[in-house]
């Protein structure tokens, strides 16, 4: 019965019937769905919390995607349970992602995991019940944005850069990019104002509002954007919304900030504590830090006066190419002689690692349970630098030792689609 329900839901979304529906949830109904999600997810899935940024509304349906996962849960208004829709494994690569609904599709943008952040855009596939990577034309910085939002058909993303990572008081640069969701073209745009943005914020989802976007973390209100005036604000003196109520932290409590039209409803443990008018809140506690009405395509400085110095540039470039060619020939000749001797020495060092039986499994023991590729496993075992043949032998040695130390901790399985490939299931309880 539940399988038939999932098929119906997939067909329902694929053909866009929801385009005629308006989100019909009230803040109290959303609070009920989030409370149920928090309880079920924490009971049946390792320790994942629910945030105000983890849901999207589709008529009488609420889609919940716990941050840091690819899981997709359905909550139907009035139900007392969730329905799992996806068939994804836990990967944990998208903590801090932003969740969006665009043209009745679910998108996730940016995130952090496996010691790296990224700016990938992925889209949930209703048919396959998996996530697909969206290939963009143009490039975004290879790091997670500090803040992003959709306005019309554009996805705006702000990236923060520190020109001197080792100097604490160095000025942080802010670069602004836009992705046209119709053409999937990514471009940089001019933004030269001083950086006053806070980083790593979650976007609170909203009910029926076409005006406000709000960001925060740990139930706080930190940034507010007015989609009509294109103005961005930072909260510099607003009070704690929950009147001193304490929670468990990490969003494992039942406190929620829910946005409806021009108001933020504060709900704690099912009780409505307050109803904050956003216009008044902006006037009382916020400072305007940006005006995005005039955003022009970014032009790199070195190309602004290209026509004036074209001849000099081409002459310099030609001389530089000749010098580089001559230098390369000399360098490669010398390097070849050196590399022959060093190459033999390096191979001998690789083979010597097979005789080293002092294994370090610390990185492997820190992984969540789930499924990993051979590449991911080799990175965790710290043997990915080895040549393939030696790496296979070293992996076999280490897994043999690990199995004797912790039987059942890891299991090798044949890939269901590629019989000559393996994947590894870690059971880290």
Image (cartoon, rainbow, N blue to C red):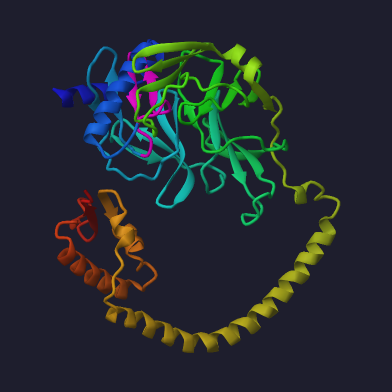
| Residue at 56% from the left image edge and 47% from the top image edge | 141
Q: Is residue 129 above or below residue 382?
A: above
**Which residue is depicted at the point 38% across and 25% down?**
55
Q: Nearer the viewer, residue 362 or 20?
A: 362
Q: Is residue 298 left or right of residue 401?
A: right
Residue 21, can we see it? Answer: no
Q: Position of residue 126 (x, y in %)?
A: 31, 30
Q: Position of residue 324 (x, y in %)?
A: 69, 74
**Residue 123 seen:** yes
Percent coordinates x, y for residue 310 in the rendering: 82, 56
The x, y position of residue 401, in whole percent, is 20, 69
Q: Is 86 situated left or right of 102 in this image? A: left
User: Residue 211's image quarter?
Assistant: top right
Q: Does 418 sit left or right of 133 as displayed?
A: left
Q: Please determine whether, in this image, residue 97 is positioned above or below residue 388.
A: above
* Outermost residue toward the right in this view: 308
- Looking at the picture, tell me which residue is in the foreground, 149 or 200: 200
336 vs 341, nearest the viewer: 341
Q: Residue at x 37, y 67 (%)?
A: 384
Task: Confirm whether the magenta stretch covers residue 62.
Answer: yes
For the point 24% across and 59% down, which residue is it?
Answer: 421
In the image, is residue 57 above or below residue 393?
above
Name above or below for residue 100 compared with residue 404: above
Q: Quadrant of residue 89?
A: top left
The N terminus: image quadrant: top left
Residue range highlighted in magenta: 50-68
Look at the image and say whether residue 53 sits in the magenta stretch: yes
């Amino acid at each position: 019965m539940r399988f038939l329900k999932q098929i119906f839901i997939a067909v329902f979304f694929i053909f866009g019937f929801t385009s005629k529906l308006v989100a019909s949830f009230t803040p109290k109904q959303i609070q009920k769905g989030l409370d149920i999600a928090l309880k079920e997810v924490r009971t049946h899935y390792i320790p994942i919390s629910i945030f105000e940024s983890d849901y999207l509304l589709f008529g009488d349906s609420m889609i919940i995607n716990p941050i840091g996962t690819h899981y997709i849960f359905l909550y139907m208004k009035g139900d007392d349970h969730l329905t799992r829709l996806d068939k994804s494994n836990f990967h944990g690569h998208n903590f801090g992602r932003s969740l969006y609904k665009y043209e009745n599709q679910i998108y996730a943008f940016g995130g952090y995991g496996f010691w790296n952040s990224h700016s990938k855009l992925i889209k949930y596939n209703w048919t396959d019940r998996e996530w697909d990577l969206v290939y963009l034309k143009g490039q975004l910085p290879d790091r997670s944005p500090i803040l992003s939002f959709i306005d019309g058909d554009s996805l705006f993303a702000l990236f923060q850069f520190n020109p001197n990572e080792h100097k604490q008081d160095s000025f942080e640069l802010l670069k602004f990019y836009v992705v046209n969701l119709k053409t999937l073209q990514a471009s940089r745009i001019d933004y030269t104002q001083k950086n006053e943005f806070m980083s790593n914020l979650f976007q609170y989802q909203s009910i029926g509002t076409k005006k406000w976007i709000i960001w925060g973390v740990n139930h706080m209100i930190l940034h507010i954007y007015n989609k009509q005036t294109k103005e961005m604000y930072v909260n510099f003196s607003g009070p704690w919304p929950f009147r001193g109520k304490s929670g468990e932290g990490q969003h494992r409590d039942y406190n929620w900030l829910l946005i409806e039209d021009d108001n933020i409803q504060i709900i704690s443990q099912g009780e409505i504590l307050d109803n904050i008018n956003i216009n008044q809140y902006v006037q009382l506690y916020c400072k305007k830090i940006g005006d995005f009405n005039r955003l022009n395509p970014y032009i790199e400085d070195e190309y602004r006066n290209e026509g004036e110095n074209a001849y000099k540039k081409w002459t310099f470039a030609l001389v530089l190419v000749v010098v580089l060619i001559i230098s390369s020939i000399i360098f490669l000749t010398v390097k070849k002689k050196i590399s022959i001797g060093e190459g033999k020495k390096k191979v001998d060092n690789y083979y010597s690692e097979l005789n080293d039986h002092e294994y370090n499994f610390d990185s492997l023991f820190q992984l969540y349970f789930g499924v990993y590729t051979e590449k991911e496993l080799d990175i965790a075992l710290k043997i990915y630098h080895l040549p393939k043949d030696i790496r296979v032998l070293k992996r076999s040695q280490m897994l043999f030792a690990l199995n004797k130390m912790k039987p059942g901790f890891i299991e090798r399985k044949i890939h269901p689609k590629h019989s000559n490939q393996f994947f590894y299931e870690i059971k880290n309880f």
